[in-house]
Image: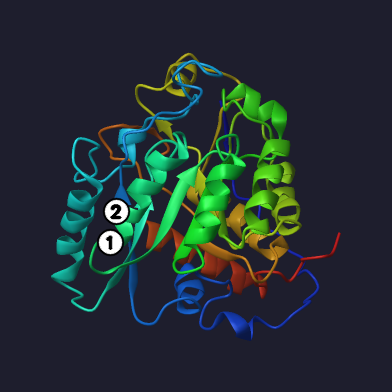
Amino acid sequence: MRIFMCNFATVKPSIATSPAQFGLLPYLSYSRYLQRHFEGKVQKISVNMGLSCPNRDGRIGRGGCAYCRNDAFSPAYCHSTRSVTAQLEEGIRFFARKYPAMRYLAYFQTFTNTYAEVGEVMKRYEEALDVEGVEGLVIGTRPDCVPDAILDALGQLAAKHYVMLEYGVECTDNAVLRRVNRGHTFEQAVDAIKRTADRGLQIGVHLIMGLPGHSLQAMRDEATTLSSLPIDVVKLHQLQIVSGTTLAAQYANGAADISLFTATAYAALVADFLERLRPDIAAERFTAQCPKSLLMAPDWGLKNYEFAELVVKELRRRGTFQGCRYGRK
C-alpha cells in the first residue's frame, strides 16, 4: 500500500486573473454560487426515493461500485419507507429551529434518482416542490441513466424552479472506472452533461480523488478536462475505505493499487486542482465524512470545514487561487 505524502510546489504559477471575484476565499465557494440564484440562506435536505442502480440490479452489473456503501453517507431521517414529503418536513424541522428564515433544496441523494419511468420520478420531484419552503431540486444520478424524456421533463420544470442534475462522474479515466465497477464510461458522462446543458439545467459533477490506479497528475488534469464542459459545480472527496465494500476486502488483502492520502497531501492536490479549474465553476466540497463505525481508512480526525481551511491556507501560502492556471499548460 502506498501513501501519498506531501510534496508542495515551490514555484508560483503565473497569475491569470484576479481573485477578488471569489470574496474572502481564494476559490468560488458553493455558498457564493447559491447567492447568485437565491436570496437568504439555502440548505439542501436529503431525500431517498428508494430507487436502485443499474450495476446493482443486473441491468449492467451486480454488487455496485467497489467503494460504495450508501448508508455511510445518508442522514438518519432519509429512509425510502417514508414519503418524500415526510423526509423533507423532518429535515426542515431540524434546520428551522436554528434558522427560521431558511429556504431549502430537495436533494435526491441516495442511489440513482432518474432510474425509473419518467412519470414516476417527476411525480416525486413535484411532490418535493409542493413542500413549504422548498425552492428547487438537486438530483443525484449516473450519466447512463438520463434518457432524453427525463431531461425534457426536467427542462420544463426548470422554467419555474431551480433544478440541478448532479452526476457521479467519479473519474475521467475509463480504466479506473472499470477497476471500481462503475459501469459507465467518461464518454457517456460527457454526452449526458452536454444533453443536460442543452435543456438549460444546472449541472454538478462529483469526483472521487485517489481511486485505485489513478495517478496524481491524472487527478490534476481532471480539472482541465472538466473545465472544457458546461458544468456549474464540482464536488470532490477523498477515497475512503468503507467497511462492507468490495474495496474494503481488497484493501484488507493488501491490494497494491489502493493508495490513500494524508490530509496535507490531499490539501496540496486540491489546491493543484483548483488552480486549473475554470474560475466560474463553484467548488461545493472537498471531502466526505463516513461514520467512524464504518470507516477503515484514512481517519484524519478533521471536519469538512477544517479540511477546507487547510486548502485555503495552502493556496494562500502559494499566493494562488482558483483558475490562475486555467488555460495554461
The furthest residue to the right: 329
Structural crowding at the residue carrying mark 1, measured as other residues with C-alpha within 10 Å and reported as few (<14), some (14–19) or many (≥20):
few
Residue 119 shows up from this direction:
yes
Using the image as rendered, state which of residue 56 and residue 219 is in the foreground.
56
Residue 130 has which mark?
1
Question: Residue 36, position in %: x, y?
Answer: 51, 78
Question: Residue 301, position in %: x, y?
Answer: 34, 49
The quarter in which the N terminus is drawn is top right
Using the image as rendered, state which of residue 157 and residue 66 is in the foreground.
157
Position of 118 relative to 255 (above/below)? below
Position of 255 relative to 18 (above/below)? above
Position of 68 relative to 75 (above/below)? above
The tally of labels here is: 2
The residue singled out by tag 2 in the image is 127
The furthest residue to the bottom: 20
Label 1, label 2: how many angstroms apart (C-alpha)?
5 Å
Using the image as rendered, state which of residue 238 and residue 33 is in the foreground.
33
